[in-house]
Image: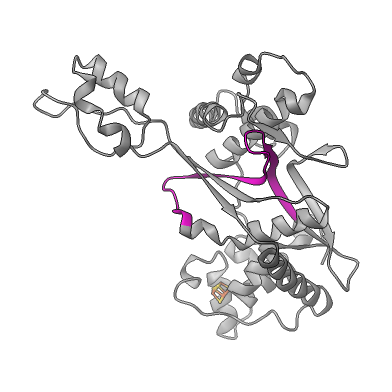
Amino acid sequence: MKHGSYSRCSTALQCGHLYHLKYELGWRTETRQKAPTLGSWVHAGLEAAVRAHPLVSGQPGAPVRDALRNISGVSVLHDRNEYPEVEIEGEGAMDDLCDLATSITHRVIDSAGIADGRWETIELDGVPLIEHKLEVPIPGTDIPFIGIIDWCARDTDTGLVWLIDWKVRGNFNDEESESFDPQMALYQHMLKMHGIEVAGTCTYQIRNRELAVPKMLKNGTAMSRGAIATDWPTYRQAVIDAGLYVCDYHDMEAKLKPFDRPVFVHRGADVCEGVWEQMSEMSCAQAIAPLTIWKWRNLSSFSCPRCDFREPCIEGLAGREVDPKLYGITTPKERGDA
Ligand code: SF4
């Protein structure tokens, strides 16, 4: 094992056999993502935005909005060589996805207060904590535990430092379901181990589509009052364009589904430390005792139907020889990274 991670631990907790196939045997399905998703594009665009902001780049007084207007995630993904096989320009559906991602990114740049200078990026040893790989040693080993964070920044309105995680979603989670996120608790503790105390974490949920425009009722007399996902300026403009009175629709401002919903969670240091203790103990066991304790199948009616390795797993369970190639699975040897 070259490193420990949250996904290794959570996979092992989900199913020991899946952990064995994925991390010990290094199996990968060929249907692996080959092109950027909307989420990865929006992430990359926001990364570019916060890197370009004057508080990061040391260009105070720069016309922030102008500088950010041309930002999109495309250059970030190309620079990182993450999807070299995808020619983004002129690819039709890819262009549409890119346009949508850019439009969403620009809206978040405004709504999250990035363009207004609300946030000041925190640095670690002179490196801005933007899409940053945190590393801490796994106790009892010489192997690092790695976690990649989206952004660590100080809210200049309150002075509080937050660990921010962008999430592009169709539906938003409520505060209760976001309040205990073990991965965020873990990364909060890893930041503390580097001497950075954060007040908590912010899951910044972003709607995965354009703002909807309300429709007229079929009889053409009034605007639909459905709770669509849009903002008040868009709804208001549609009312005006339809020749209706805005004052008749003011109640809709409170009924519309928001475009984004940041959930801030203050989390105690003791909880975060507890999560780290469990994850680091698991990672230590994974490093020291491979192929012995992490092989049991969970055989769950919830996990198994969704599992990429379901068919070879069942073949193996039946005691038959399994050739991963027959299932479109590659091994480290075939990929040249053994
Ligand atoms: S099919 Fe089920 S038991 Fe088999 S590896 Fe996947 S999750 Fe585990």
Query: Does residue 84 appear in the picture of this structure?
Result: yes
Q: Nearer the viewer, residue 89 or 240?
A: 240
User: In percent of the image, x 65 and y 18: which residue is there?
Assistant: 64
Q: Tell me, yes or no, whether the highlighted magenta stretch contains residue 163.
A: yes
Q: Quadrant of the N terminus?
A: bottom right
How many numbered marks, from 0 up?
A: 0
Give the position of the C terminus as an image quadrant: bottom right
Query: In the rendering, at what x and y percent does residue 139 appear?
Result: 85, 70
> Is 108 situated left or right of 285 in this image?
left
Please say whether residue 31 is visible from this viewpoint: no
| Image position of 293 with respect to 233: above or below | below
**Residue 210 picture quarter:** top left
Question: How is the structure coloured here?
Answer: one colour
The span picked out in magenta is 147-175
Residue furthest to the bottom: 319
Judge from the rendering whether residue 64 lies leftward or rightward of residue 39; answer left or right: right
Q: Residue at x 70, y 50 (%)?
A: 198
Q: Is 25 placed above or below 200 here?
A: below
Along the line of sight, the residue nearer the viewer: 250 or 225: 250
Q: What is the quadrant of residue 5 in the picture?
A: bottom right
Rendered residue at 55%/41% (across/down): 39
From the viewer's perspective, is residue 132 above or below residue 26?
above
Q: Is residue 202 left or right of residue 97?
A: right
Q: Position of residue 75 (x, y in %)?
A: 68, 27
Q: Main secondary structure of the magenta part?
A: strand
Residue drawn where x is 60% and y is 86% of the image: 319
Residue 270 in picture, x, y percent from top left: 69, 67
